[in-house]
Image: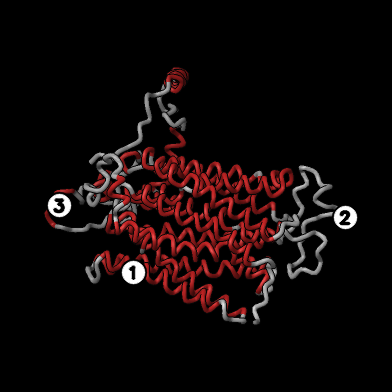
Amino acid sequence: MQYPTPSLGNKFTIISLLNAILNKITGTAACTINLNGIPDYFLRVRTALINSFSYKRDETALTTTQASEDGDTGKYGLGHRHIQALLYFISLTISFISTGHIGVTIVAMSIPENNTETNSSALTWDLDEDVTHDKVGFLDVYQSYDWPKSTQEIIQASYFLGVVVLMFPVGLLGQRFGGKVVLQLALGVNGITSFVVPWCVAWGDWIAFSVIRFIQGCVLSGIYPGINILITHWFPVAERNSLSSFIYAGTGIGSMLAFLLGGILADSRFGWPSTFWVIGIACCIACILVTIFAATTPNDHRYITEAEKIYIARDQVEEVITKPNLPWEKIITSVPLWATIIAHVGNSIGFFFFFMQGPSYMFGVLNFDIMASGVLVALPYLGSCISALAFGNLSDYLTNRKIITIKMARILFNSIACFIPAICLVIITFTTSSALAVVLFVISSTANSGHHTGWMVNYMDLSPNYCGLLMSIGNALANIFAVLLPIIVSAAVTDVVTLLLA
């Protein structure tokens, strides 16, 4: 079958000219430059690396005729689709590190330099005691800022405002040109902007910080839609739950690493600026990996075997072969879609609340220092990573063996993801025990990962052709509440340290 692929246009004349010059000099085509500008020896290295992960198998073992006659779901073992899954996992993990560390880092950035009575551990970067923000220069990035809680919430809300503004256009971009382009744009721009944050904040204070977070929200808004588009092209239905859960486990691992890195690096001798530098470099490396190893569809991959293509395509013949004009009327009037979006929005509100307010709660209410706050906030996401993989494999097991239907699996895991976290958050408001609060956060986050095999994958069930666009709509609506949430918190909580006792 033929997958819809983005048009690359005609070959550039300059590339052909360089190829001719190289061939004339070397007398061979071994060093030709391809359309992407990557020398063949890089491609050969890439091939060797990819092939090292692949099992040898009988290339004629799987055919569409055999599959249709036998009704066999088939097994293909490890292949290039698993390399793609790993790349998407890395991309999602790093994007969530970039998004999540702000909750911890902004606490470190906002500690007044002359405040010696804070419950924070000693900040070890070198600062003169009599230096204030008004006296430092553009290159003096090792400083803290006297930002009130309301200003911190504006900075955090700026990111989600960017997500809302460009979520829908980026979803259309992914539908038109493929998910790989969206990932490259998100990781590349985010890497550069993250690296320059310390200098920009030293120059423009919280306003510059808010602008950068807005830009990052704009480009990272395409991560989920882009990955969903790639999943529909690369993974057969029989493996979609397990591989999708593996990829989406990157949200939990990324969040966990974000809080760990935010706490450890902010408390190190390199200070909070090192968090942005490390994340910026990581994003750029991930962008390079996606550029070299990822492919928009199996047909775009240079080294995938025909047998694996057949295995992937067998369940997708009717799914992604055509893309007619957008059926807006059916989208707007689809009851199952709106049910999915409502579950998406409701589940996301609880996730965003802990994602943004968890570090401040640990630091200001439970009285943990910055490093401890980062570590403790990371614990729930460790549980989320483990349960995401367990839920995904359990869902595949139950549906592939016809124990329950796909619809029932979606309802089951979506209910786990919504009801258990809601109950835990209500109980937390009544407890005065720090240990119990942390345990409830862990249980809440562990159960919340059920949404990976609930409403999230249901977008692909509803419409493989338009799953990226549909998720963009849901994400845009969910992130509207993410923008409003910090504003509501800043209005309700005038002091970070709020008494738990009545």
Q: Can you say which quadrant of the picture contains the C terminus?
A: bottom right
For the point 44% across and 40% down, which residue is it?
Answer: 181
Residue 130's disc is: 2
The residue tagged with tag 2: helix, strand or loop? loop
Q: Earlier in the sequence, mark 1 or mark 3?
A: 3
Q: Earlier in the sequence, mark 1 or mark 2?
A: 2
Closer mark to the observer between disc 1 and disc 3 = 1
For the point 33% across and 53% down, which residue is it?
Answer: 55
Q: Can you say which quadrant of the picture contains the N terminus?
A: top left
Decide: is 347 above or below 37.
Answer: below
Decide: is 356 above or below 208.
Answer: below
Q: Amino acid at mark 1?
A: Leu
Q: Amino acid at mark 3?
A: Gln
The percent coordinates of residue 158 (x first, y second) are: 59, 51
The part of the image, by quadrant, that contains residue 19 is top left
The part of the image, by quadrant, that contains residue 154 is bottom right
The percent coordinates of residue 17 (x first, y second) are: 44, 18
Q: For the residues marked 1 and 2, what is the alpha-carbon distance in whole angstroms?
A: 59 Å
- Local crowd at mark 3 within 10 Å, few (<14), some, or many (≥20)? few
Query: What residue did someone put label 1 on?
Result: 394
The residue tagged with tag 3: helix, strand or loop? helix
Q: Earlier in the sequence, mark 2 or mark 3?
A: 3
Query: What residue did someone put label 3 on?
Result: 66
Q: For the residues marked 1 and 3, what is the alpha-carbon distance in whole angstroms?
A: 28 Å
Q: Nearer the viewer, residue 44 or 381?
A: 381
Q: Is residue 321 visible?
A: yes
Q: Nearer the viewer, residue 478 or 358?
A: 478
Q: On the rendered structure, is 199 left or right of 172?
A: right
For the point 68% across and 52% down, which residue is it?
Answer: 274
Q: Amino acid at mark 2?
A: Asp
